[in-house]
Amino acid sequence: MLKPLLALSALAAAVPALAQTAPAAPSPADAAPADWRAIPDNELLVMTLRGGHQVFIRLAPRYAPAHVANIRKLAEARWWDGTSVYRVQDNYVTQWGGGDDKTALPPEVIENPPAEYEWPRFDGITSLARTDPYAVKTAHSADGWPLATDGKTSWLTHCYGMVGVARDLAPSTGSGAELYTVIGHAPRHLDRNIALVGRIVEGMQWLSALPRGGGALGVYENPAERLPILSVRLASQLPADERPRFEYRATDNERFAAWIRERENRKPPFFTVPAGGADICNAQAPIRRAP
């Protein structure tokens, strides 16, 4: 067994060798500049937490138009300011909003919009090679959303970082005032049962690494444990020079198809046995800060 000082010396000697590794050659899976498309300001929600930490959420108005309309109205009314993150359930979800606070919703917010859980069309392209237990086929929309279908209807999937609308028992559909994000293994059993309205594109660590709640379903029993929300704004509400800029990777091209194939067939030297397929949640389309 190496003594600690010898072990550190061996590690230090190895670092320069790693640093000198030649850069990877260009791959057919690399994105072209034109593949990166801007996320509109009114489709980006900025949540500022205690300590100034920020979480950025891309909204999905194409797939949940009524719920996203509510969310925009709530942000414009500054309804979330002073609310909190009040539930963190291990390997499941982090939830925020009013909690048990009965603060009235703005009058223009619909308390129970239509159930936007699935729709008759399937917009998916660049399908994954294998099915999963929850769908006949999975794929991405052209603008990067993870989709599934049973051949008759289609829906967004509950992947890590996706944002959904908390609700009571049906016929409640949730107003959007109470939101959650997936922080554990994808709970795909929730697909088609709750409206998904977006995806966290940056700042996930501020919600996934919180202490777990000790109450039922991970609710914080002591109000002092809750994480205060300072503000929630649409990027379009912010001054132009303060607006965050993000881009999604378009999926309607052969370069993204090649990227999917690489995700489905990881290569040596690290991977010695390619899987031959991937879960849709392990192949979410990339999103980046705009250069």
Image (tube, grey):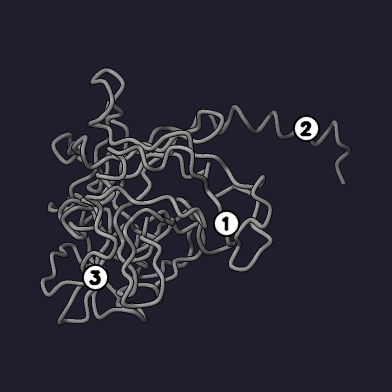
Mark 2 and 1 residues: CB-CB less than 8 Å, in contact? no
Q: Is residue 24 left or right of residue 270?
A: left
In percent of width and height, residue 210 lies at 60, 48
| Pointer 2 local density, CA inside 10 Å: few below 14, some 14–19, many at least 20 | few
Q: Residue at x 21, y 68 (%)?
A: 114
Q: Residue at x 33, y 35 (%)?
A: 233
Task: Give how far apart the Cα atoms at labels 2 and 3 are.
Answer: 58 Å
Task: Give how far apart the Cα atoms at labels 1 and 3 are.
Answer: 25 Å
Task: Give how far apart the Cα atoms at labels 2 and 1 are.
Answer: 39 Å
Q: Which residue is mark 1?
A: 88
Give the quarter of the image for residue 176: bottom left
| Kind of residue at disc 3 | Ala
- Looking at the image, residue 265 lies above or below residue 3: below
Q: Residue at x 25, y 30 (%)?
A: 237
| Kind of residue at disc 2 | Leu
- Select label 2 or label 1 by which is in front: 1
Q: Is residue 193 left or right of residue 20?
A: left
Q: Which residue is mark 2?
A: 8
- Looking at the image, residue 118 lies above or below residue 238: below
Q: Which residue is mark 3?
A: 115
- Looking at the image, residue 228 lies above or below residue 108: above
Secondary structure category for the residue under label 1: strand
Secondary structure category for the residue under label 3: loop
Q: Earlier in the sequence, mark 2 or mark 1?
A: 2
